[in-house]
Amino acid sequence: MSGSKVRLNAVKAVTDFERSEGSVNYMDANPTEFFGENVFNLATMQDRLPKSVFKELKNVISTGAKLDSELSDIVASAMKDWAVEKGATHYTHVFYPLTGLTAEKHDSFLEPDGNGGALFEFSGKVLIQGEPDASSFPSGGIRATFEARGYTAWDVTSPAYLLENPNGTTLCIPTAFVSWTGEALDKKTPILRSQQALNKQAQRILTLFGHTDGAPVGSTAGAEQEYFLIDKNFYYARPDLLMAGRTLFGAASPKGQEFDDHYFGAIPERVLACMHEVERELFKLGVPATTRHNEVAPGQYEIAPIYEGTNVANDHQQLIMLTLKKVADRHGMACLMHEKPFAGLNGSGKHLNWSMGSSSQGNILDPGDTPHDNAQFLAFCAAVIRAVHKNAGLLRAVIASAGNDHRLGANEAPPAIISIFLGDQLTDVFAQIKKGGAKKSKKAGTLAVGVDSLPVLPRDAGDRNRTSPFAFTGNRFEFRAVGSNQSIAGPSVAINTIVADSLDFIATKLEKATKGDPKKLNRALQSVLKEIITEHGDVIFNGDGYSDAWHKEAENKRGLPNLRTTVDALPELTAKDTLALFKKHGVLSPREMKARQEVYAEQYCMNVAVEANVVLEMGRTTIFPASVRYQGELAVSAANLKAVGIEVDTDTLDKVTAHIKTLQDTLNELEDMLANVEGKTILKETEFYGRKVLPKMLEVREAADALEGYVADDLWPLPTYQEMLFIK
Ligand code: ADP
Ligand code: MG
């Protein structure tokens, strides 16, 4: 009887695994001593570059000015010396293709010296620009194969770093990836463009409020990353986890997350050892990962860094994902970043905390101390409200993926309806503005009516609302609908751009109304705020986003879109207004937007197709045989008993037989379906996969999961939910 060998071996391997306490013990490791030691940061540059060069480079970094070739040669040489001293032999231009992954192509510093030997060389030209063989990265039609060239260009504003692997160290240079025509092929380029757009419009508003220092305004991002850790032995024994990142089969465990005992419990020691090592790696890379805790589902955890400027935060986010996977592996675990690895349990998100600020203004979404500051805060806050309401469909589209669809709308993650939670106090202030001017803040104790007839707002973070996709949390917005596996680039770019557009709208009105007279500002602002809240106030919702009542109200009374799946959401990327908006602010051209839509649609179809093929394979070669063996056992035993005159109730056999039949039928139907892919365009093809293939896969799963409830445990071939989630 060998049916369950794989599974039983896995269970044995997990229980036998020698758990170590890990290599990082905070009793003798002081993070301040190694934080940033593998980063070519400002301090290192100052150390190693001639004074004038450092000054010039610093200027380039803070203003985004052009880097001349003489300067880049000096920087490259210093960077190489530093890297080589620390053991590097290779360098790579790191870039972020549209697949959401991190791409690297390594080259050696080694060059022949002409006398039969070799030396390490690294020129400014090589630092600044690379030409990876990029034809295999999806471009959404931007690059036909005959023009397959793509260039990587050094992003001076994100520091280079060293990635240490057991067999060598590599100098990593963050880059933007563009086609030879200059069109963006990656996720970094639009971040940089959208930061510029945001800055341009924010400066206009700040100028109206008398802040003319010009310190660049940019968005900030702090992303809370949720993930699962399970033992590697289970991972390798589940083709679905290995191929698709989520379980495509699996009956619920008798105990799930209902006791909240994992959430509030202590971090298991094996996991803590892993987390410590993750942190050490990240600290060395200058990633300020400071928060860690258990999450709701058994086996689920979270890591969150301190926020940074969006561009660097995005690079660091990618490093966090890579590091988690790499280090978990060292500890005998697999890190699952899929949005829904286990049905029936909470999935994983990546809450994107978003704000904007500058060196002179600090956090612009922090309500101020004076009525004047508050007026400015309300202007920026209103811009976000307008932006989110006008572009709800777009915001849904930028978080659309095959994985995230399983999470949005379930009673664990925010619904697919994009609304804003503002908290009672701020909602009340806007309600008063709508009526004709805010005079009072709701809490009597904190009331302070200023000359501007706008109240002083208390700096209280307000209530938390875990059901809102876009929640104001006191000094920032938290976009909670982002998926755990996703890059934060897409959502960040979208928010930056739509907010820039609303700031543009507000600035234009205010400039017109004040004509340079600051005394007219308050009245003008009152009127714009009133207009915005009247037109866009429907997007504000402080109640329970999970409730049915909200779904009805959002759709019927407020007309908010409810784009349930990626299939519904992706068309939004090329809506007429969206294309115009992204073009106007110079973030993405219509061609670039369409290319992105095409790539994301392709990714969706490929993901579902792979999953469907795994369902076929596992259904036929793993679950069906085990079930039939058990069916045989039941039949033989029934026949034997009958032969000696014992009456047998064949109820179980009949049920097993019926489920086996359903399994077989639905597998055949799925196979037929996959042999005839429908859809003339890639968007039509997403409809085929989303509306036909996925439901069919679920039918197969239902039959298989039912069989798991009957088949003898010693025959069942796949590690169960119970084993994967609870044996640590
Ligand atoms: P919670 O789980 O309670 O939402 P966490 O501490 O886990 O809070 O995460 C909050 C995240 O928000 C952190 O990454 C934090 O750095 C980030 N954050 C705080 N202020 C800002 C800001 N101004 N802009 C962007 N992100 C911010
Ligand atoms: Mg958190």
Image (cartoon, helix red, strand yellow):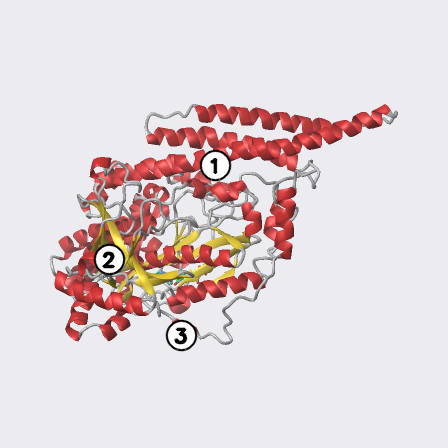
Amino acid bearing label 2: Asp
Q: What residue type is labelled 1?
A: Glu
Structural distance between the alpha carbons of marks 3 and 1: 44 Å
Q: In this view, does 493 lie to the left or right of 695?
A: left
Ligand number 1: quarter of image: bottom left
- Residue farthest right in this picture: 645
| Residue placed most toward the observer, 594 or 36 | 36
- Mark positioned earlier in the residue sequence (2 or 1): 2
Q: Distance between the residues labelled 3 and 2?
A: 27 Å
Q: In this view, does 490 lie to the left or right of 707?
A: left
The N terminus sits in image quarter: top right
Residue ID for mark 2: 155
- Which residue carries the number 1 mark? 611
Residue 588 x %, y %: 23, 45
Pointer 3 and pointer 2: residues touching (CB < 8 Å)? Answer: no
Residue linked to disc 3: 32
Give the crowd class for mark 2: few <14, some 14-19, many >=20 residues within 10 Å.
many
Q: Is mark 3 on a helix, strand or loop?
A: helix
